[in-house]
Image (spheres, rainbow, N blue to C red):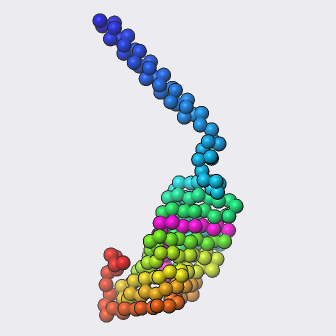
Amino acid sequence: MFNLRRLLAVLILIAVLALGIVIWRHLQQQSPLDVLEALPEQVDLSLEKLHYTQNEDGKRSWTLDADKAEYRRDEGQAVLDAVNLVLHEAGQFGEAKLTAEHGLLEQEEQQVEIWGNVVVVTARGDRIYTERLRYDGQKKLLTSAEKVRLINPRMELTGTGLQADLQRGQMRLEKDVWMLLLPQERSIQNAK
């Protein structure tokens, strides 16, 4: 009876090893073409955890991080998910951090368009909320045709059609402008 238990244990061990080898070989046989065929037709490359830094004159100009990027070589664009964009030199605004659900990077033109719960936080305490925003890295310009809400410790400003020239430190809202000036500073951490 003792030998029968040993024999059964050895047979079970051999069966488990054989199954493991079959599964491992099956996974190894998946060709790179099969992996490429799983991508959508217009996508040439798909990446997880993209990190991209744009340098100018040896200094970081802006840094882009995304949870997922699908690069389309023909269009020269990367479609992004869960975007974090940091503008390292945003003039009078200081460093600016932009977040959004989705984005589109046009690397050659240094253009980034982001959309879906866009939030901009500047080093000097401004918060900007909108649904879609475009950053032109060559002109250092933030633009949006959407409704925009700006909050800082001393005021609240809303309007439609934003143009923010980061080099000059100027910001303009095109229409439907409303402003509330506050008599004293307030915490804007949770204001939205």
Q: Where residue 118 sits: x, y (%)? A: 46, 73
**Residue 89 visible within the image:** no
Q: Nearer the viewer, residue 138 or 102?
A: 102
Q: Nearer the viewer, residue 29 or 120?
A: 29
Residue at the image point whose x is 46% and y is 23% from the top: 17
Residue at the image point whose x is 42% and y is 91% from the top: 178
Q: Where residue 29 sits: x, y (%)? A: 59, 33
Residue at the image point whose x is 54% and y is 34% from the top: 27
Q: Which residues are magenta?
A: 91-108
- Name the quadrant of the N terminus: top left
Residue 144 counted in the magenta span: no
Residue extending farthest front = 41
Q: Where residue 70 sits: x, y (%)? A: 59, 58
The image quadrant of residue 55 is bottom right
**What kind of secondary structure does the magenta stretch mostly adopt?**
strand
The image quadrant of residue 54 is bottom right
Residue extending farthest right = 74
**Residue 80 visible within the image:** yes
Q: Nearer the viewer, residue 87 or 146?
A: 146
Q: Is residue 67 left or right of residue 141?
A: left
